[in-house]
Image: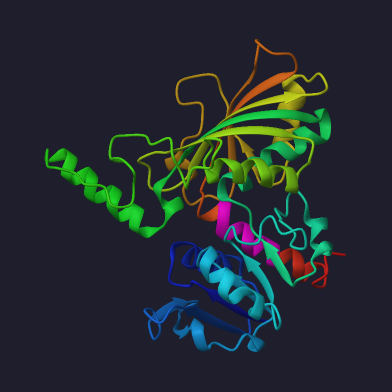
Amino acid sequence: MNIAIVGATGNVGRKILEVLEKKKLSIEELFLVASSRSTGQKVNFNGKEHEVFNLETFDFSKTQITFFAAGGKISEQYAANAAKHSIVIDSSSFYRMDPDVPLIVPQVNPEAIKNMKKNIIANPNCSTAQLVIALKPLHDLFNIERIVVSTYQSVSGGGKDLMDELIEQTKLSLESKEIKSRNFTKQIAFNAIPHIDVFSDDGYTKEELKMTNEIKKILDEKIELTATCVRIPVMVSHAESVNIQFEKPFSLEKVRDALSKAKGCEMYDSREDGGYSTPIEAEGRDETYISRIREDKTNKNSLNLWIVSDNLLRGAALNAVEIAETLIKTNFNGK
């Protein structure tokens, strides 16, 4: 099997390489593809140096699966052409809500791959990916009606430039020097910014609306979700405070049992100091960690959770590679 990675030199592209190396997928040829700025660079994979090809001239007929990890504008311009020759797994937001493109989290809705009509499969937003892994087993048991979620998202969700600026601002702040934000609307160092992506007319940001729309497409159209998305001065891993209202009564025992058995989930929930997961502990780990499991005593059939996961790994690269694994296992048609 031949594989290409578009955006191979970026955060998500490099993380996809790490996951492919770790999983030891059977790859005959690997093509690393990026913009002209990165063309000719060498990237190590499995102990071998691979040269980066120019996206503008790359021949996608050489590949069976192509990962797009370079942002929506690149996917808009190049993914449809790549899909004429290769199945595209797109990590950008461009195709997520296209009715002819399945939006897949393999632990949740792998059967939706059979609805693929354009040879393209979309990877969800990183905040959505970790959330639905925890929601799926609970929805199956108790039928989720409504979700209220606040996200606390690391700067890596916005790319390397944001990560570099957090380091720079932190140094400047500690030295009591003036800070002028380039990639943030306000200072990010030692701060929290309740604004990710652009605002819509109703006051919600695009990031918040993505979560609402993607949850409906992946899990259930009937679920209502409202979100507040916050950028925090953390390098990697997103955290989420989640309130879930069910149609059916639940017990904490059944919730814990379901989450402990769910693929991709790991409970880390003891009611003592430090008995919960934080972003730094989730970094570099495959699992979605679930903590602070407790009944919401103010509302009938409602539950509170704290969810943490590595956004670059679980929320993007690992999910994309698991989609590829699902394709391979099902002979590329989801059946």
Left or right, 234 with respect to 135, comes to: left
- Residue pictured at 73% horizontal, 41% vertical: 262
Task: Point out the stretch of residues depicted in magenta.
Answer: 314-324
Q: Quadrant of residue 112?
A: bottom right
Decide: is 87 above or below 285: below
- Residue pictured at 79% horizontal, 72% vertical: 332
Decide: is 214 above or below 6: above
Residue 150: x %, y % from top left: 53, 31
Q: Residue furthest front?
A: 201
User: Magenta stretch containing residue 70, yes or no?
Assistant: no
Residue 133: x %, y % from top left: 68, 43
- Residue pictured at 50% horizontal, 76% vertical: 46
Decide: is 253 above or below 85: above
Q: Quadrant of the N terminus?
A: bottom right
Left or right, 133 with respect to 8, comes to: right
For the residue pair 141 and 128, the one nearer the viewer reads as 128
For the residue pair 333 and 95, the one nearer the viewer reads as 95
